[in-house]
Image (tube, helix red, strand yellow):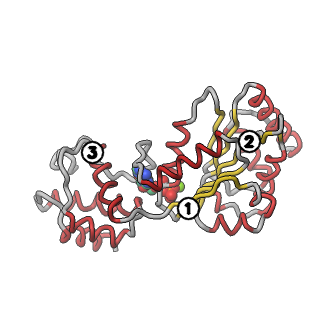
Amino acid sequence: MYTDYWGLKEPPFENVPSDRLFRSPQHEEALMRLIYAVDHRKAVAMLTGDVGTGKTTVAKAFMKQLSEKKYDARILSNPALGPVDLIKAILLQFGEKTESNSKTDLLNLLSQRLYRNSERNLNSVLMVDEAHVINDQSTLDELRMMLNLHANGKFLITLVLLGQPPLLRKISSLQPLKERIGVKYHLEPLDLQNTIRYIMFRLKAAGAVRGCYTKEAVSVLHGYTEGLPLRINNICDRCLLIGFMRKAHLIDAKIVNEAIEDTR
Ligand SMILES: Nc1ncnc2c1ncn2[C@@H]1O[C@H](COP(=O)(O)OP(=O)(O)O)[C@@H](O)[C@H]1O
Ligand SMILES: [Mg+2]
């Protein structure tokens, strides 16, 4: 709607985990640590952060970076399941089909797949997004059990757990899983400087040839959004719409305040 007015090819601030990663120092570090974890076959890597900090976006960039020749990496996005359904969901992600509901059968099938991968020199990786929603202790236990599988002194799978901070608490109460965490990182929101860079990055990716926000505007925006990309997207999008309706040349602090009012 406003794209032509701002000289854009597409809306810049869509709230879907885009596969164009803005590499703030923190997002870059999160990505590097995850890659280190799978490269060195760590048992567990954990990435935490509040909602909207960019965990799923990092996960997408991470998956994209893993060569299919070296990794068999899968992502489980809805892990709020009981133990049997969890194993079924994991098998489904790995493309293994079965009618069985027997936990033993399911676990056998999964371990066969992981051994097969290992024989083919493929590192198996399972990412579990929103892992903090797992309420069932026995489900977490089931994940841990996957780490009991070894071949040639190496873990057969790397678990990458992504979730909001309560994940830390849940894992802490599960000593055997906690002790296997080889890589841990907490994503903080963006500071002002990186909020400016983030907005520029998204605008450029959408085809902008000039900046659209004044410095004051971004400063107000950063204060309100606390540097959470999810919120920055929401407000920035509204600003472009309001700016378009007002025929503004630039988004200033007044428009940002109006956009903030809109969300209340
Ligand atoms: N580093 C980034 N690069 C580009 N977009 C990002 C980045 N981090 C977050 N976002 C944007 O913010 C939104 C929320 O990020 P998301 O990865 O879903 O957060 P989380 O999984 O931590 O809740 C995403 O839709 C995405 O558009
Ligand atoms: Mg997410």
Secondary structure under tag 3 reads: helix
Q: Is residue 90 left or right of residue 112?
A: left
- CA–CA distance between discs 1 and 3? 28 Å
**Image coords of residue 138 (percent x, y):** 81, 59
Residues 112 and 118: in front is 118
Q: Amino acid at mark 2?
A: Ile
Query: Which label sits in the foreground, 1 or 3?
Result: 1
Residues 151 and 231: in front is 151
Residues 89 and 181: in front is 181
Q: Residues within 10 Å of mark 3 (few under 14, many from 20)?
A: some
Q: Is residue 91 left or right of residue 239?
A: right
Label 3, on which residue?
204
- Location of residue 14 with respect to 19 vertically, above or below: below
**Image coords of residue 155 (percent x, y):** 78, 42
Q: Quadrant of ligand 1?
A: bottom left
Image mark for residue 186: 1
Image mark for residue 157: 2
Which of the 4 quarters of the picture holds residue 94?
Answer: top right
Which of the 4 quarters of the picture holds residue 152?
Answer: top right
Q: In the picture, which quadrant includes the C terminus?
A: bottom left
Q: Amino acid at mark 3?
A: Lys
Residue that appears at 63% across and 57% down:
184
Q: Residues within 10 Å of mark 1 (few under 14, many from 20)?
A: many
Secondary structure under tag 1 reads: strand
